[in-house]
Amino acid sequence: MTDDLLICGAGPAGRALAHRAIAHGLTVTLIDPRPERRWTPTYAAWADELPDWVAPEAIAATVDRPVAWTHRRLELDRRYVVFDTAALQDSLDVSGARLLADRVTEITPAARHTAHGLDLPSVRLASGQVLPGARIIDARGIGRSAELAEQTAFGVIVERAQWPDADTYFMDWRDDNGAAADEPRSFLYAVPLGDDRVLLEETCLAGRPALSPDLLRDRLHHRLRSRGIGLTGEEPVERVRFPLHGGRATSSAFGAAGALTHPATGYSVATALRLADATVAGDPTWPGSARAVRLLRQAGLRALLALPPTDIPVFFDAFFALPPAAQRAYLSGHDDLPGTTSAMTKLFLALPWRLRRRLAAAVTLPSIP
Ligand SMILES: Cc1cc2nc3c(=O)[nH]c(=O)nc-3n(C[C@H](O)[C@H](O)[C@H](O)COP(=O)(O)OP(=O)(O)OC[C@H]3O[C@@H](n4cnc5c(N)ncnc54)[C@H](O)[C@@H]3O)c2cc1C
């Protein structure tokens, strides 16, 4: 039997796609070496990015006005949600799909002409099996490579009582983490997990190479000590490392593998959830406007990588002072070309001249894959 949809990879993107395809009555096979592996990362998103079918129990915490600290405290007028990772995974029910514990070694696109007149794409599995599917979607994520800029972070999970600060920090760039002024910057990400626990994570937003999680651990400890917060050493830990770009911008790939990671934030989960229905319906994920937005975002990443450490907070101060609609367009407008262009222009004009010159030089560098 040939399935309507064969999905390679059961991470958030592949599983969301499988879940929605089943809801729309398609037959689905989901292939992953460990299709039922429990996800461990703490995923978060802007609330307005989520489709309405996301189960309420998948949300662990909602923050009405997260804060960005640059050289001042800026409240962001945009609701932020932190997922309960286990509940999100469970809510993306795939019990109607065939789950195959195997590794995809090759995806062969549909042949134009075959001896038997068959014209179906297929996957080859490590077990030797070859499976045809009416449609095949690659959701295998992105492998690491020295050419790709990465995001890294080191976090600890503490009891709320250990962290008396009432603010949720989307980014806290204050310089109390022990790093010298000319060293690459990292920021504190501090979010509630909904069960009287808080994730405190020292994050290198983008680097090629990115700061090592061990260095980020030392900075986090320094920062927390500076704020009078002691750790026992027994706290659960989260280590983060993933490529910020890469993947293929095509309708036959999805999630990080489908180039849906925002190169300036590393976020892709909400975009995958939001685009799942359209992808199941066969709508193009990458219309011309989305491709143009992708090029602009890649230019944004090149600019970020080229900024001197001392100017990073200046850059984000200008960004978070933009009107909320402009911030939203840049962070979430997958195919919003006018919104993204307008946000980037406003940001450029809000920056001091020395940064404008650097950014202009950076965006004309050769493009990023
Ligand atoms: C700790 C951490 C925190 C993050 N926090 C956020 C966040 O807050 N918000 C956000 O939007 N993003 C976040 N990200 C980034 C990004 O969104 C995630 O990496 C997300 O997991 C990408 O989902 P995906 O399904 O596209 O890919 P992946 O999660 O990488 O899933 C790929 C799946 O494919 C499977 N696979 C790989 N190779 C094969 C193969 N050959 N055959 C079959 N299956 C294969 C893997 O086993 C895996 O299950 C975070 C990442 C990390 C690591």
Image (cartoon, rainbow, N blue to C red):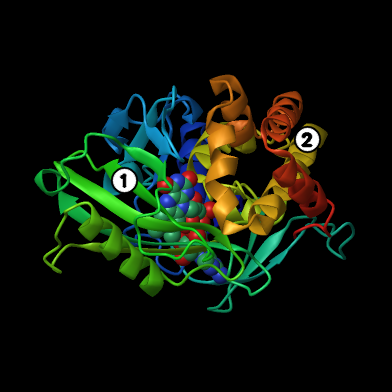
Given the image, on which type of amino acid does mark 2 rest?
Pro
Mark toward the viewer: 1 or 2: 1
Location of residue 213 (image quadrant): bottom left
Given the image, on which type of amino acid does mark 1 rest?
Ala
The answer, for residue 198, to whether it is visible in the render is yes
SS of the residue under disc 2 = loop
In terms of depth relative to the viewer, which is nearer, 74 or 300? Answer: 74
| Position above or below: 134 against 66 | below
Crowding at label 2, few (<14), some or many (≥20) Cα neighbours within 10 Å? some
The answer, for residue 12, to whether it is visible in the render is no
The numbered mark, 1 or 2, whose residue comes first in the sequence reads: 1
Residue beneath the point at 79% across and 57% down: 110
| Quarter in which the N terminus is drawn | bottom right
- CA separation in Å, label 1 and label 2: 36 Å
SS of the residue under disc 1 = strand
Left or right of 216, for residue 321: right
Where is mark 1, residue-wise? 190
| Position above or below: 52 against 123 | above
Where is mark 2, residue-wise? 287
Residue 190: give x, y in percent of width and height: 31, 45
Residue 156: give x, y in percent of width and height: 25, 59
Residue 133: give x, y in percent of width and height: 64, 54
Residue beneath the point at 42% across and 35% down: 72
Crowding at label 1, few (<14), some or many (≥20) Cα neighbours within 10 Å? many
